[in-house]
Image: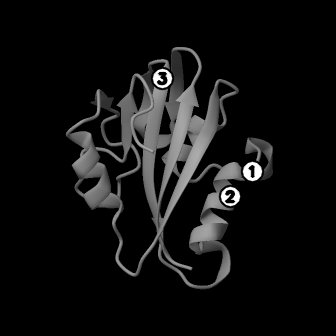
Amino acid sequence: MIGTYILQVEITEDLILSIGKIGSLRFKKGFYYYFGSAMSSTGSITLLNRVKRHLRKPSEKKKFWHIDYLLESENTKIRKIILVPCKTRLECNLANFFSEIADDLVPSFGCSDCKCKSHLLYFEKPNLY
């Protein structure tokens, strides 16, 4: 299965984390929505396998994507996963659309391969269902 996914990540207290090449970032307590995609129909980068990877313990995977650095904190928890099976990569469209109602965004997070401002949006309270 190929498509796009959204992770709802709760951060339980304010944090400063080092995120790959981006460097140190401050994360406010609240809910973050990460928009990603997996466009391979076989192997480790199918939609389901990509999401399963995000659910693994940090010790069971190499840090590769920005989200890997965020999820390694004991103060972050994936609360919800939304799968959008589709043949078109929608992560940029969804991130840009929802950025209009987000309380904030994390600049350059998760979007080193596109021209988006961010693929990680902040909401003080969970707003996307």
Residue 41 placement: quadrant: bottom right
The answer to which of marks 3 and 2 sits earlier in the sequence is 3
Crowding around mark 2 (Cα neighbors within 10 Å: few <14, some 14 to 19, many 20+) is some
* Camera sees residue 97: yes
Q: How many marks?
A: 3
The CA span between labels 3 and 1 is 22 Å
Q: Amino acid at mark 3?
A: Gly
Label 1 secondary element: loop
Determine whether 63 is above or below 93 in the image. above
Q: Residue furthest front?
A: 129
For mark 3, what is the residue?
30
Q: Amino acid at mark 1?
A: Arg
The structure residue drawn at horizontal position 36% and vertical position 60%, both measured from the top left corner, is: 91
Label 3 secondary element: strand
Crowding around mark 1 (Cα neighbors within 10 Å: few <14, some 14 to 19, many 20+) is few
Q: Position of residue 71 (x, y in %)?
A: 62, 38
Circle on res. 99: none
Crowding around mark 3 (Cα neighbors within 10 Å: few <14, some 14 to 19, many 20+) is some
Residue 100 placement: quadrant: top left
Q: Nearer the viewer, mark 3 or mark 2?
A: 3
- The answer to whether marks 2 and 1 mark residues whose Cβ atoms lie closer than 8 Å is yes
* The C terminus lies in quadrant: top left
The answer to which of marks 3 and 1 sits earlier in the sequence is 3
Circle on res. 56: 1
* The N terminus lies in quadrant: bottom right
The structure residue drawn at horizontal position 41% and vertical position 49%, both measured from the top left corner, is: 110
For mark 2, what is the residue?
53
